Amino acid sequence: MTMAQRKKERKELMDDLLTRDWNVFGTLKFENGRTIGRYNADKLLRRYWNKIDLTFFGKAAERQNIRVPRWCFAHEGSDSENLHVHFALLAPVADIKRSCCVLNAVWAQQHNQTAPMAKNWILPVNDRFKVASYLTKEYWRLGNDTFLDHLSWDQSTLEEMAQYEHDQQQARIKRAASPIWLRHAQQALEAQQAAYEADDGNLVSKRG
C-alpha cells in the first residue's frame, strides 16, 4: 500500500471518528509495553473493558448489550516496540471527570502488568480534531491494525446510559474502585490536566 493510500484511508478513519459522540481521551499503558506482547495485552484489555461495562451497567451489559461507547487504537511508539492503547470514549455518567477517575482506577489496580495511574492519561476532551488526529497517527505504519475493532463499541446512546445512573451503579463503582483509589485517580487527573494545559494542549510529548 502506498503512502498516498494510507494517507487517504487515515483521513477517512478520522472523518468517521469525528462523526461519533465522544468526550474523553484516554491512554492505557502497561507496566512494560516492550515485553507485554499483543496476546497478553489483548487479554488484559478485554477483561478491563468487560469490567468497565459491568461496573457502569451491571447485568444489562451482557443481557442488553449496554456498553460504554469507545473507539480503541493500538500504538507502538516511535521505536515500534512500546505497545499501549489510546481511546476516545463517551462518558457513561454526566460527571465526565468522575468517569475519567473510574476508568483510570480500574485499569491501574487490575493487574501487576497494568501501569499505575500517573502513567495513564484519561482526560476530558478539549479539541476533538486534535484527538482524532492523534488517535490515528500510527495508521501510516500499522494500517488497519491500529484500530482495535474487537475492543470498540458504538451501539449505546447517552440516553440509554443515563438510565443506569442510580444508587446501584454507585455501589458497583465502589466495589470496582474504592474511595481511596478514586481519590488517587482524582489527584492524577488534576496533575495531568495541569501538565496538559502547561504544555499548550500537546498530546504528544507525555502521552506516548
Image: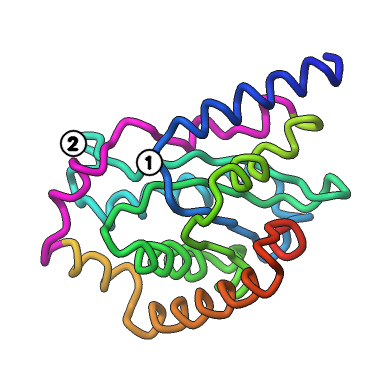
- Disc 2 marks a residue whose amino acid type is Arg
What is the secondary structure assignment of the residue under circle 1?
A: loop
Residue 3: x and y in percent read 85, 21
Closer-to-camera residue (164/64): 164
Sequence-wise, which precedes: disc 2 or disc 1? Answer: 2
Can you identify the residue that label 1 sits on? 69
Name the residue at 59% across, 77% down: 194
Residue 44 magenta-drawn?
no
Residue 112: x and y in percent read 58, 68
- Relative to 103, 45 lies left or right: right
Name the residue at 72% across, 65% down: 206
Do the numbered discs 2 and 1 sit on residues whose CB atoms are within 8 Å? no
Can you identify the residue that label 2 sits on? 63
Residue 159 magenta-drawn?
yes
Query: For the residue carrying disc 1, how many other residues have a C-alpha within 10 Å: few (<14), some (14-19), or many (20+)?
Result: many
The answer to which quarter of the image holds residue 121 is bottom right
Q: CA distance from mark 2 to mark 1?
A: 16 Å
Indicate whether 188 appears above or below 167: below
What is the secondary structure assignment of the residue under circle 2?
A: helix
Chain part drawn in magenta = 143-168
In the rendered image, the quadrant that contains the N terminus is top right
Residue 116: x and y in percent read 58, 73
